[in-house]
Structure formats: C-alpha cells, structure tokens
Amino acid sequence: MLRAVVRSLLAHKLRLVLSGVAVVLGVAFVAGSLVFTDTLGRTFDDLFASISADVTVTKKTSYDTGLFTSAAPGTEQGVPTSLLPRIRRVDGVADAIGDVQTQGVYLVGRDGKAVGGQGAPGIGINFSTANPELSSLTLEQGHRPHGPDQVAVDTKTAGKADLTVGQRRRVLTPSGARTVRVVGIFKFGKTGGLAGASLVAFDTASAQRLLGASDRFSSISIEAADGVSADTLKRRVLAAIPGAYEAKTKQQLTKESSDDLQQGLRFFDVFLLVFAGIALVVGSFLILNTFSMLVAQRSRELALLRALGASRRQVRRSVLAEAVVVGVLGSTAGLALGFGLAALLRALFGSFGLELDGPLVFSVRTVVWSYAVGVVVTTVAAYLPARRASRVPPVAAMRDDVALPERSLRIRAALGTLLVLGGAAALGLGAAGAGSGSQSASLVGAGAALLLFGAVALSPVLSRPVLAVLAGWLPRVFGTVGRLAHENARRNPRRTAATASALMIGLALVTSMSVLGASTTASIDKLLDRVLGADFVIANQVQGPFSPKVAQQARQVPGVASVAEQRFGQAKVGSSTVFLSAIDPAFVSQAIKLDFVAGSAQGLRGHGLLVDSSVADAKHWRLGDTVTVTFPFGGTEHLRIGGIYKPNQAMGTYNISLRTFERAGFAEQDNFLYVTARDGAHLAQVKAGLKKVTAAYPIVALKDQTEFKDQQKSQVQQFLFLVYALLVLSVLIAVLGIVNTLALSVIERTHEIGLLRAVGMARRQLRRMIRLESVVIAVYGALLGAVLGLAFGVTLQHALAGQGIEVLRVPAVQLVVFLVLAALAGVLAALWPARRAARLDVLRAITTE
C-alpha cells in the first residue's frame, strides 16, 4: 500500500500542490504570528536583561499598574536623595547610585522633527556612573555630560539623526525646549536595542531639574558586595528603608516585566491567529474538494485494490497518508512563508516606531504548532473522502463506470437549518443589546459563526434553486454553451457548494468589515459634531504626553478664549483597573459638549467625579454617592459623584479635575488641548498663531475640527486596510479552490469533453463554457457571502451602538464592486482549466474512461 500511495502522489502532483497552497497560507499565519511575538518578546527581554543593578529601590505603587502605564508619576513619587547615603551604609552594599528617568524628552533632528517620536517613547535619563555593574550605558564616543547644556544620546538615536559628537541640537523636555551640545554617544545594554525608544542623558543635577525635583531620584540601583546574594541584600535594604518604598532583585524585576509583556502581547497572538484560523477553515474546503474529486476519479483504481485484497482500513489509510504528505509539505512551505510574514510585520511596526532589533526568533514551539496545525487540518479535511473511498465495493472494478455512494442531503439540510436558526437568534439578541457592548459583540460573533456553518451545511440544498436563477439567463444569451455551463454548475451540488463556501466565508467577512468600517467613520463624523465644542485640538502625534507649556503659550495667542487641558491616567475602582480622564471644570463645557442626566460639569470641583450613565446604571450609582478610587501613585481618595452624563467618547467613563489628578501623584503633562476661539475672532488668524506655538514642539500637531475628524477616520481606515489585506489571503485561497475544482473537473470530464469536441464544439466555445461555469460558482459564493456579511455588519453595528458606533452605513457601491470582482475572479480562475480543456486531443479524450 505504501508503494501505491507514493505512485498516486507522483501521478497527481499538480492537484495536490494546489490543495497544499491552502495549508501553506494557513500555516504561514500561525508561524508568522508565533515568530513575530517571540521576536517582540525577545526584544523586550533583552531590554529587561539590561538592568544592571542587583537590587533596585523605588516608591511603592498602590497596585500593579502593568508594564505600560497610562501616565507618568509626578515629582513627589520618586525616592528621596537622603535615602542614598543610608542605603550605601547597609552591610553588603558595594555601591549604589541614584537614577533619574522621565518621559517626553526628544532630540530634534535637522528636519525639525523629533527623533524617535513616532510611537516609542522619548526618555530623559541621567548618566551618573561608568560602573558597568550599575549602569546599562557604555560610552562609545566622547564623554559623559556635565552641566545643563550637555547631553549624550544612544547609538540608535545618533544614527537616525546623523549625529556626531560636538553638534548642537534642540531637545524637547516637559519643562520646554532648549538647545544643547551632544558630548557623548553611548550604547544601551549589550545590543544597543531600545525597541524604537530614544534616550537623551544629562548629568544627574540637570536630569533632576528636568524631572522637577532636585531632591529626588526615580529609583536607586544597588550593587551587591562579593559573596552577598541579591535576595539577602534585598532583605537588608528593606529593613533600612521606610515602608513607603520597595526593593526588588534583578531577577524579580525581569520576571514581572516579562509577565506583564506577555499579557500585553496576547492581543497580537489572538489577532493574527484569528486570521490563521480563517485561512485554514477556508482552505479545508479546498482540501475536502480536492480529495473528494481525486477519490471519485480513482474509484475504479480503488475498487481494483479492494479486489486484490486490500481492506477498507488500508484504502482509507492510503488516502489519509496522501493527506499527511500534503500537510507536511504544506507546513514546511508555510513555515518559510511565515518567516516572510513576520519580517513584513516587523517592518510595519517599525514604521510606527516599534523597532525590533536582531534576527527573527525561530523557536521549537513554532515548528511544533506549524506542523501540528497543517497536518491535522489536512487530515481532518481528507477524512470524509477517505471514508467514502473505503466503501468502494471490489466488484466495481469489473464495471466501466463506478459511482461512489452519495448520501442524502436531508441530514445536512436539517443540521443547517438548526444552525441558521441558532445563529439568527444569537444575532437578534446581540443586535437588541442583550448585555454590555462586549457581551453583545460576543453574541454577534457566535451568531455569525453559527450562520456561516449553517450556510455551509445548507449550501448544497440552496445551490440548485439559486443557480437556476443566477445561471438561468445563460442559455438565452450563449445558447447551447450557456445551457451546458448551467447544467455543469448544477450537476454536483456538493462540489459546487464546497467550492462556493470558501469564497462565501471570505466575502462574508470582508463585507461585514466594510459595513462596520463605513458605520464607524460615519459615527465619528456625527460624534465629533455632537461632542466637540472646541475650534482646535492640539495633541501629541503618538497620543503621548507633552509639556504643559504648550497650553500656557496657546492661551497667549490673540483670539483664543480658552484652552482646556485633558490628561489621561488609570486608577482602580473596586477590583477593576479603569481608564481615567482629567480636565479643568472651568473649561470642560466649552471644549466638550456633555449631555448631563444629573448634575453638571461643576461637579468636578473639589473631590468631584463625573461618570457616564452606563457605568452609573451598571453600578447603581446616583448623584452625590461616594466612590472609593485608588490611584497608582497617590493612595486612595473618596470622590463624590458630581455629574452623570450620557456616554461621550471624548470624555471616557471616569473623569476627575486636574487638581485631583495632580494630587493623585500623576505628572503635570497634557494629552489633549481643546482650544476655543473668542466670538467674532478670525479662525484662520487664530490657527496661524497656534501654529507658531506648536512649531516649537515637533511632537504635537494642531488640527481644526475638519482635520481632527479626518485624522480619527484615517486611523480607522488604516486598521481596516490591514484587516482587508489579511482577509484577501482567504479570498485568494477560495479563488485557488475554484481553479482546483475546475481543473479536476476537466480531468473528470475528459471523455465528455472529447465527445463535445467530436460533435462540433469549437475550442473557443469550450473555453467559454468553462469560464461561464466558473463565474456562476464564484457569483453564487460571493452573493451568499455578501448577504451573510451584510447581516453580520448590521447586527454588529447595533450591538456596538452604545460604544459610539451609532450610525448604520451600508457601502452599497462597495458591495456591488465586491460582486463584480468575484465574477472577474471566476473568469481568471477559469483561464488555465479552460485552456487545458481546449488543448485536449479529441481522439485520446474520447477513448478515456
């Protein structure tokens, strides 16, 4: 049987390669996502491993804020300089230094743009020691900075800015911009990699002034004496410092940071693996079709094997063995393609500022999962054809034609109906808002999955009546050729359904994303028209914090009535970590239009808190209730609810005043500025004055209302383009499925094609017949997909209406374009099979059994 399997594989190389393409693309997603996240993890692990100190002392936080906090601590949240001599006196301490670090520090390049200000943070630090046991910085050129006008920069930043020692450049800091001289270039850690971040180093005194507290460090790094373990030193240091501070070993800090990173990377894993799953599900139809047709074409051969003594189990195993070989070869090619996908992802994230240094990581788990997924999917998809092959009776080898047993479609029809009804019910509940926004979206997702599988089950039943309508006009337009194409498309409903289902899934997802994207952009327009009261918005180009001096200078621009500062942070309410917004109660009503259910914006004053009505209803809060809020840097406060407003995406769900924000220990840095012009002021002149202010701060951008809307919509479009690009691969697999089905169908109908040519059908007519058959199948799958995708998109918009997607917008023109492209894909898919059919030798085709 092994020899028979090998001979069969060699005899059907092209067909198996076409089915293997589906495995290649699906496995490429799996391998690419694993390689990319492993590389991302390695990059940050190298950063964490660059921590040189054996023990580090910091101010305690009220709770674990994770690796990426939403706001920096204020000046009072560091470690007093008075602790440094006390720590140096602890038994077992070889050396100790104070470290200073603050965000929002960027070097300005010759082009006037901030170097490294495209996603990753710009960090200011102190270059306090050359001790390699305590410093992660290794001086490569020049010397360490001395005085407020000297800085050193990391090698990556120096390379991007084309810097050499001795040059003078501007530096942006939280306290404003200044001109400095670059006196040194250093490497960070062993590799110099910073994941896109930029480092600007000052001497310690200058860095402390930059932080705004000359009597504080951000942390203290400690080197253990010979023979003293890090754990022992940690216990001794803890005994010598006040309880408001904590000490952690290098191993402990590295592990905590790595765990937080893995938590944050789950999104990338899930996001990419979802598309891997889509590609593999779509590909399974291609594999199922391929093996079904191969088994059908080899029915007499299989009957001969049975007649020669092969058992049913041996026949079944021979077909599955072919599937395993396809799975192994496809997985191998998918691994290689996955590396290419990971490289593209690295380049994409690099353009956003997240740079992954070093080679891509190739781990054992990537190999194991890739082969496991590829082989299992292929084997499962081939199981049903293999089972049917084992049922070929030995006596069939004596007949000229062998028909494989066909099961009734009744069971599929009943199962499909149940799935469709269940999916429709889930979609209805999701659209009706049965639960929170995330729960409603989950219901829609579950309903969509059930409907898709239901449509796949019902597709053979639906194919005959639907194709009768879709292809009914072919005989009238194309005569006999059209009639033959019509009948060929309807001849085998299972095969047609399997071929069309792959395209149906891809088009359903693309259509639903189109509806959701169009609804989101329309909702952004409506939302900003309703909630944005300011004439201009100033924000960091990467959504990070920036100097409050921008607001101070903007207030001095002629024609400006008010500037409302908005800052972001996080806090804990009960057991949940929540997003926090802070804004000045004096100007919030001018900047953002709020629809209050109870109270007013003035409820922010003092220890006030504003919450949106969805949170208040869920927690049964009323005006005047007291809410206990735990801040990461400033302990716990009891805030009084001074206002409840209808959900407003510009404000978020929890809002405090700027004074409360500063009292909570957050740094005085802004995230957004909402600028309102005076009545009667010329907006163009006000904008010109504001541009002069922002020109001095390359990391911030000024937008009027129209530009701000376009920016928000462009971010949605960028995400949708990424989703479309990934979904195109599933559509590509579906088109390959049509190619494969038609190619195998030509081989299966070789005798029939020979007879058609013998009775006078021209090669051109034969090619047209196969093209029409392909177009009908493609349009059938695309039409089902468009209908399902429309249902998914509409219900998902209803489910997310409470999350800001309030407007339903169906891109009708785009949907028509999808159907036209599907028809064009059918034409292209038929080119090679049609050409192959037209070139068949007539006499040889007639004699083929």
Image (cartoon, helix red, strand yellow):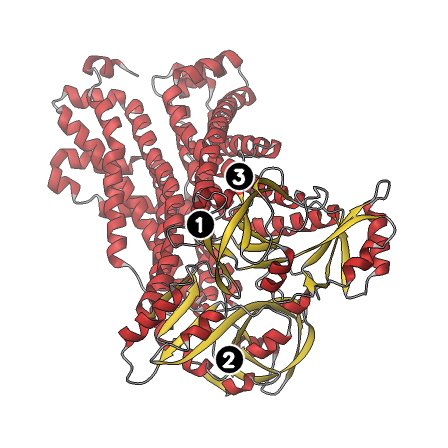
Which mark is first along the chain, 2 or 3? Answer: 3
Asked whether the beta carbons under mark 3 and mark 2 sit within 8 Å of each other, the answer is: no
Residue 582 screen position, x and y as percent: 54, 74
Q: Amino acid at mark 2?
A: Asp
Question: How many residues crowd around disc 2 within 10 Å: few (fewer than 14), some, or many (20 or more)?
Answer: many
Q: Amino acid at mark 1?
A: Phe
Q: Residue at x 53, y 66 (%)?
A: 175
Query: 143 left or right of 727?
Result: right
Residue 400 screen position, x and y as percent: 34, 17
| Element marked by disc 3 | loop
**Distance between mark 1 and mark 2 Cα atoms:** 32 Å
Q: Residue at x 36, y 72 (%)?
A: 536
Number of residue marks: 3
Residue 523 appears in view:
no
The residue pinned by badge 1 equals: 352
In the foreground, 733 or 115: 115
Question: How many residues crowd around disc 3 within 10 Å: few (fewer than 14), some, or many (20 or more)?
Answer: many
In the foreground, 240 or 631: 240
Up-down relation of residue 606 to residue 344 (above or below): below
Query: 289 left or right of 609?
Result: left
In the foreground, 796 or 643: 643
Q: Amino acid at mark 3?
A: Asp
Q: Quadrant of residue 698?
A: bottom left
Query: 729 left or right of 488?
Result: right
Q: Quadrant of the C terminus?
A: top left
| Element marked by disc 2 | loop
Residue 357 numbered tag: 3
Asked whether the beta carbons under mark 3 and mark 1 sit within 8 Å of each other, the answer is: no
